[in-house]
Image (cartoon, coloured by chain):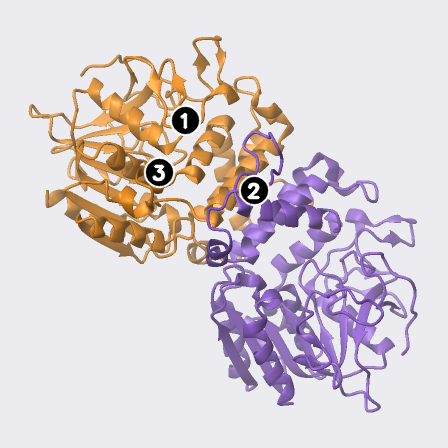
Chain colours: A orange, B purple
Amino acid sequence: MAGNVIPLHEASPGGAATVRLPGPFRMWRGATLPEVQLACETWGTLNAARDNAVLLFTGLSPGPHAASSSENPAPGWWEYMIGPGRPIDTRRWFVVCVNSLGSCFGTTGPASIDPRTHEPYRLDFPELAVEDIAASAHAALAAYGIGHLRAAVGASLGGMAALAYAMQFPDALDDLVCISAATRATPFAIAMRSLQREVIRSDPAWQGGYYPPGKGPREGLRLARKLGLMSYRSAVEWQQRFGRERVKTPVEAGAPFGVEFEIEAYLEHNAQKFADSFDANAYLYLSRAMDRFDAAEHGGTVEAGLARIRARRTLVIGVETDFLFPMQQQEEIAAGLYAAGRSVSFVPLASIHGHDAFLVDRERFAPVIERFFDAD
Amino acid sequence: MAGNVIPLHEASPGGAATVRLPGPFRMWRGATLPEVQLACETWGTLNAARDNAVLLFTGLSPGPHAASSSENPAPGWWEYMIGPGRPIDTRRWFVVCVNSLGSCFGTTGPASIDPRTHEPYRLDFPELAVEDIAASAHAALAAYGIGHLRAAVGASLGGMAALAYAMQFPDALDDLVCISAATRATPFAIAMRSLQREVIRSDPAWQGGYYPPGKGPREGLRLARKLGLMSYRSAVEWQQRFGRERVKTPVEAGAPFGVEFEIEAYLEHNAQKFADSFDANAYLYLSRAMDRFDAAEHGGTVEAGLARIRARRTLVIGVETDFLFPMQQQEEIAAGLYAAGRSVSFVPLASIHGHDAFLVDRERFAPVIERFFDAD
């Protein structure tokens, strides 16, 4: 394996490696980053022909720890999907998961030190595009000796990145797996994310983006995460799971208008965890990159952008209860790929788990992914 | 007309009257308000038999100015629905719209002066229930000499209040019109409102609820309103109306991560307007009352609560794209009324306008309301 292996950010203990790109990185909107490092985690073994590599892009918030390993036995964010005997079977595939450029788990982002100023980039980090997440991952694969992927896989932002990868490097992959993604965001999704960003910006601790390292707008992030969570699950799931249950143990005890229902406690618990782990500026950059992503930039129209994709096989999965990346957007991707002559498996799933279904609905997702990879 | 007519809050110029309830008002959860006044606006003429009165409850945010009048020619919030020759025809009906108890447009609420302390109530205002909105309106009708309604009408919170009215005073109305309401909120709706309240509470200007009059948490209200708006319309409508249009004239010029898309400018414009007109504590009280409302309090179960209603005719309207008060909740109301032996007209509408459709989708709503009232 090429690339430096150095200790990583504590959020990704063990298992992950740091890949330093060999030179400056030219970004999609024109700026150049003098140095880029990417936190990558791998599972399985690259074969001698180097033709069994699967690249996994992440959603907005996870790090590269997609599954447990001997180096890091903690369950990963896609634990049920990746491993020996699992749908993406690591006895057969060499899986690489990359912490997105612009994120904060060991990869270069707004919280990283700018080598020219020896200060964190903060808002001097150049504009980030989804294409940069894809292209930096492509460059990182070279450190593993991989020039061609058996498959690029991603959900949500990761699905956008997988699309960007396939549009930018049409000859660099055989198969494309695109889950709950979009060729471009709806105004509803933009509004949801814009409000999250505004809540962060409204926290005085944000300080116009120039907060001291580790002293960011925790309250703003916490509230933004709650809003994000509102759009990641579904009303049907919450009805079944929480109904109108009241909290049994006090949260925010005595606070007027504080937590009363279980659904509120669930959001609070999750938002607290997130606010302790994520960099606010990284969130802003990644969030806006999702708003601005537009497959039409790859050919003048969305259709022409999708027509650049030359993957041998494609799998497009959507979830009925996803209102952030709704089913129509998955249909658009599938139809566009089909119109361009690709082989398309389009699988609409009747999951109640909304946009995050790929993370939690093993019952529906595992067989679909397994069938696709086993048929290869 | 009985009741005092005194000058009102400037948010309801002309047209509205203030009705002072004759004595202390006992609230649903047990507290007593020593004095209650309600801002009411009326259209049409009460006939000699006093049997042509229609009571209109409002949603969370409007005042009593539902339609224009000679005293106040400004268009009201349900302008297309109320007036001579309109679906609720004021040549025939005497329409009374009440600013909800707990609100801030001339009606007693948290911003009102507590006569015992000569200070605003603020958080010393007692817990507000939807039942209090209904019961105080019922008491106000006596000032007009009305003991029995031809119809109670409401949408959203107003629909909950109309249900509460019909459950508390089953013999005091002939007809019930319930639009985009609920017997009790879903966890999704609770989460949406809880986060709005938390954003308000997180604004330092809220000062734990004890901000000086007129110096409330404007930023918190502004952000809360954006979040509210996210749940009042639909993704489909915004796709058609805004798509991915960029703003032509700058908003938040130069602000990093500021407004870029038209959808963001639309939300900003609306939220600014709202933040200038609404009292933050009133918002908190009304919002929580919606979370806590539960028809089961009227009989042990939702079904038993609905079975208290004895209206001669009922009309239940739902909107397919409403995800705050989804269609299943309208079906539950209609089914419950039907099971209790009521005459039920259930009308599901394929509007793209979401929860707020009753405000804007004249084409779909006007004929349904007109048919119901004309058949009477």
Residue A239 drawn above or below residue B175 = above
Name the residue tied to disc 2.
Answer: B248
Where residue A103 is drawn, which disc sits there? Answer: 1
- Number of marks in picture: 3
**Which amino acid lies under the numbered mark 3 shown in the image of this protein?**
Glu
Q: In this view, does A238 lie above or below B374?
A: above
Chain of the residue under label 3: A
Badge 3: few (under 14), some or many (20 or more) residues near its Cα, within 10 Å? few
Q: What x and y, as percent, mark residue B224?
A: 63, 46
Amino acid under label 2?
Lys
The disc numbered 1 marks a residue on which chain? A
Q: Residue A154: where, in percent of width, then height?
A: 29, 39
Q: Describe residue A95's horizontal placement relative to residue B177 as left or right.
A: left
Do the numbered discs 3 and 1 sit on residues whose CB atoms are within 8 Å?
no
- Chain ID, mark 2: B
Inter-mark Cα distance, 2 to 1:
31 Å
Q: In which quarter of the image is the N terminus of chain A?
A: top left
Tell whether B11 sits left or right of A365: right
Mark whose residue sits in front, 2 or 1: 2
The kind of secondary structure element at disc 2 is: loop
Secondary structure at numbered mark 3: helix
Q: Which residue is drawn at 81% across and 76% down?
A: B141
The residue at 73%/80% (across/down) is: B84
Q: Residue A280 appears at what percent x and percent y?
A: 51, 28
Is residue A255 among the parts visible in the rendering? no
